[in-house]
Image (spheres, rainbow, N blue to C red):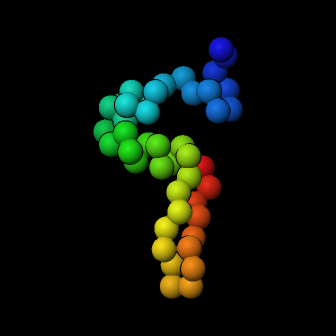
Amino acid sequence: MQPGIHHGVYSYPEAARILGVSARRVARWADGYFFPRKEGIGHSEP
């Protein structure tokens, strides 16, 4: 499989180690996430 959209060069744990952050944070950046807002729920796109 060639690297590209949806197929990264690094796994989340490898990227986390390189960046010095948690694998969970890398996953949130890569996959997007939902969060509470004053009115409803917000979403952060990848």
Residue furthest bottom in the image: 38
Q: Position of residue 40 (x, y in %)?
A: 57, 79
Please give left or right for residue 15 compared with residue 7 in the image: left
**Side of 25 where 43 appears, left or right:** right
In this rendering, is residue 28 above or below 7?
A: below
Q: Residue furthest top?
A: 1
Is 10 or 36 nearer to us in this picture? 36
Task: Specify the quadrant of the image occupied by residue 22.
Answer: top left
Q: Residue at x 60, y 49 (%)?
A: 46
**Residue 45 location, quadrant:** bottom right
Instruction: Pick out the residue farthest to the front.
Output: 40
Number of numbered callouts drawn: 0
Q: Position of residue 7 (x, y in %)?
A: 62, 27
Q: Residue at x 50, y 48 (%)?
A: 29
The quarter of the image holding the N terminus is: top right
Residue at 56% across, 52% down = 32
Give residue 35's position: percent from left, percent from top.
49, 68
Q: Residue at x 57, y 27 (%)?
A: 8
Give the vertical position of 14 relative to 22 (above or below): above
Q: Is residue 44 above or below residue 20?
A: below
